[in-house]
Amino acid sequence: MSMFKKMELSGDKSPKIPGGEAEKVKCLIVGSGPAGYTAAIYASRANLVPVLYEGLQPGGQPSITTEIENFPGYPDGVTGTQLMEDIKRQAARFGTDIRSGIATAVDLSSSPYKITIDDSEIIQTDALIIATGATPKYLGLESEKKYMGSGVSACATCDGFFYKNQDVAVVGGGDTAAEESLYLSGICNKVYLIIRKKYMRASRVMQDRVMERENIEVLFEHVTHEIIGENGGVNGVLLKNNKGEIVRKDISGFFVAIGHTPNSGIFKDYLETDEVGYIKTVPGPTKTNVDGVFASGDVMDPHYRQSVTAAATGCMAALDAERYLGTRKF
Ligand code: NDP
């Protein structure tokens, strides 16, 4: 589910301020992944007194991932949850006002910018740092929708346990699919990894690990035709191979790991995005086409999408916001 749902706005797009004056802050951060919390660390240390709204997925994508081995400073690896708890604690230590709530609409037509939280409350801000991340993509099959949450999942670490000692399938050929397959192979009896091309897109090290794991069977040049089941649960998947033949695999869990969609929906009326929806920033800094609005992390990064690059752009956004606030009168 998207971290941000678009709110229907009436007339001039200005959300109504319920019960008088809206709260006004210097720096508002939306999103609580590595980008959001790193922006918070820098913004609070720079005395911007930031308020951060966590969004629908507190801790962002790392919080639903397993082991992270490539975040600097953790030589033995760290779980995604632990990493995000650590970064959050660091942001809180410098006084970031961390709140739960989802940004449901924005008005970026003039400064101060107005952000609606949970469809009800409005907060005004001089500088806005967007760190709303990205949401998993789905195949778009009817059967995928039908069994969502009862056999179909986009998060192995969240749901893998339900398929302990059973057979499952993962679709996708990138690092996420490789990581999910490896995780599931430690819990499940067998994992089918369904890849539409002749090759995997995942990094070499991840490909090697997948290939070495005995209970992962990689099915190249296979596409998912239908997920099948009965009594409200999944019991198989029909795959089409490169000869056009339909083959059935008996599984009880189907994991989708085919990439992500940037959570930029509510900003689209104001901010330039690419054709996929990634917010465009000035190359180098994190400035968007609206003065005082900065984008960081996976919502603006279609290329790297790593926790460490997200954290880096969060830092950049806070520095850009500090410079912006320091050179203008509000
Ligand atoms: P990617 O975009 O890298 O890969 C998506 C995969 O899904 C591709 O193999 C793609 O196939 C396949 N796919 C897309 N649509 C469909 C479809 N409709 N049917 C079947 N297959 C489909 O996404 P990831 O989420 O894997 O990775 C995103 C980024 O995050 C990458 O940069 C990755 O390196 C990084 N990452 C790093 C990790 C780490 O370092 N620990 C862990 C996870 C992610 P095709 O190749 O044919 O287009």
Image: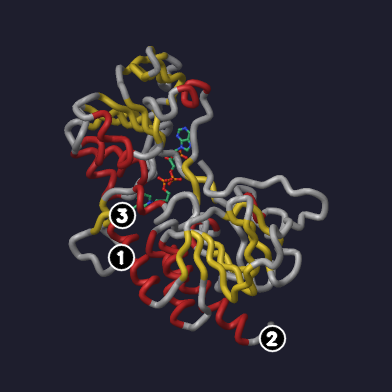
Q: CA distance from mark 2 to mark 1?
A: 35 Å
The residue under the point 55% across, 81% down is 322
Which label number is shown at residue 81?
3
Figure check: 30 above or below 217: below
Q: What amino acid is found at the position of numbered circle 3 in the picture?
A: Thr
Labels 2 and 1: the sequence-earlier one:
1
Left or right of residue 272: residue 233: left
Figure check: 180 above or below 71: above
> Which corner quadrant of the image does residue 179 belong to?
top left
Labels 3 and 2: the sequence-earlier one:
3
Q: Which residue is mark 1?
A: 86
Figure check: 39 above or below 105: below
Q: Residue 190 at what x, y percent from top left?
A: 22, 27
Q: CA distance from mark 3 to mark 2?
A: 40 Å
Q: What amino acid is found at the position of numbered circle 1 in the picture?
A: Asp
Q: Nearer the viewer, residue 138 or 24?
A: 24
**Ligand 1 lies under 8 Å from the Cβ of mark 2:** no
Tell me if mark 2 has few (under 14), some (14-19) or many (20+) residues whose alpha carbon lies within 10 angstroms of its own.
few
Q: Residue 98 at what x, y percent from top left?
A: 45, 65
Instruction: Find ligand 1 in the image and state its quadrant.
Output: top left
